[in-house]
Amino acid sequence: MSVAERLSRIRKYLGLSQKDMGRRVAVSGTTWQNYELDNAAPNAHVLARLSDEGFDINWVLTGAGEMRKDGALETKSVAGFAELPPREIGREKLAGGNYVLIPRYALRALPREGGAAATTMEDVSLNEALAFRRDWIERELGARPADLIVVEMTGDAMLPTLVPGDLLLVDTSAPRMRGGGLYAFNLGGALAVRRLQARLDGGLTVSSDNAALYPPEDIEQAALERVKIVGRVVWRAGRL
C-alpha cells in the first residue's frame, strides 16, 4: 500500500469527501485529491494535522505499525452528517491491556406531530467512551473495535424490544444492508433505529416493533438514496 493509498484510507475512515478532508487539514480539496493520486506529497503541516487527529505518521509514511496511535480515541463521522467532535477524556491504558474505549454518542429526541419522538443528529456530541474487552468484541460479535460506536436508544418505536436508555453497539463497517435486521440509519435528517428488510422489487421496508404506533413504511427503490445506513445493531444493554 502506497502513501497515497494510506491517505485515501484515512479519508474513508473518517467518512469525508476529498474537499472536506482537505478542509480538515487546511489544504484545498484539489490538493488532497493530488495526494490520493500520488501527484503530490503531504507537507509537514498536513502530517502534523493528521497526527493531531490521532493517526500514526510512521504508518502514513511507511506503512509500519497501526493506522491509529496507541491509545488514540476513535472518532468517526456518521453517514450523512459531519464528524462528531470529541471531548477530552482519560486515555490511560486500562488494567490488563485488553480493553478498548468505544465512543458513545448522545442523541437528542425532538417531538414529532402526535407526540412521538424523532432523534436528530443536530446536537450530537461525543460525551464519553465505554470500555469493552477487545477479545469479547472479536469473539462474540465478530467485529473490530474501531468499527463500533455506542448509541443510546430514545423514543418508543422499538418497544418492547428496546426501551429508552438502552445502550446499543452499532457496527459501522461497510455501512450497507447485510440482510434484514436492526439498523441505525439516517432518514431525511433523523437518526433512527428500526428493522430494515429488503424487498424483492429492490425497495426497502422499515418497520418498528411498536407497530401500533409506528406502522411499517415501504421505501421504493428510486428513493433509497434517502436512507443512509450508519451501521447494524449487534448488541444491546439495558436495565431490567
Image: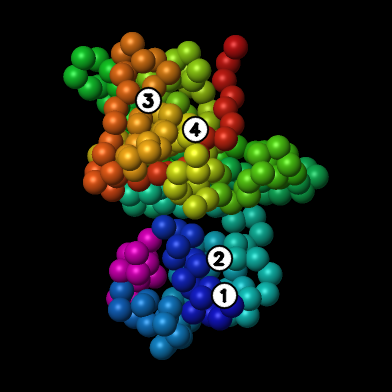
Residue with the most extreme bottom position: 39
Query: Looking at numbered disc 3 in the image, what kind of residue is underneath it?
Result: Ser
The residue mark sitting in front, 2 or 3, is 3
Which of the 4 quarters of the picture holds residue 26?
bottom left
Asked if the residue under mark 1 is in contact with the one under mark 4, i.e. CB atoms within 8 Å, the reply is no
Pick whichever of labels 1 and 2 is earlier in the sequence. Answer: 2
In the image, residue 59 sits, relative to residue 165, either above or below, namely: below
Asked if the residue under mark 3 is in contact with the one under mark 4, i.e. CB atoms within 8 Å, the reply is no
Residue 200 percent across, percent down from the top left: 38, 38
Q: CA distance from mark 1 to mark 2?
A: 8 Å
| Residue at the disc numbered 3 | 207
Pick whichever of labels 2 and 3 is earlier in the sequence. Answer: 2
Q: Quadrant of the N terminus?
A: bottom right
Which of the 4 quarters of the picture holds residue 215?
top left
The residue mark sitting in front, 4 or 1, is 4
> Does the rendering let one see residue 128?
no
The residue nearer to you, when weighing 155 against 182, is: 182
| Residue at the disc numbered 2 | 55
Residue range of the region highlighted in magenta in the rendering: 16-28
Q: CA distance from mark 4 to mark 2?
A: 33 Å
Asked if the residue under mark 2 is in contact with the one under mark 1, i.e. CB atoms within 8 Å, the reply is yes
In the image, residue 178 sits, relative to residue 213, either above or below, namely: below
Q: CA distance from mark 4 to mark 3?
A: 10 Å
Disc number for residue 181: 4
Pick whichever of labels 4 and 1 is earlier in the sequence. Answer: 1
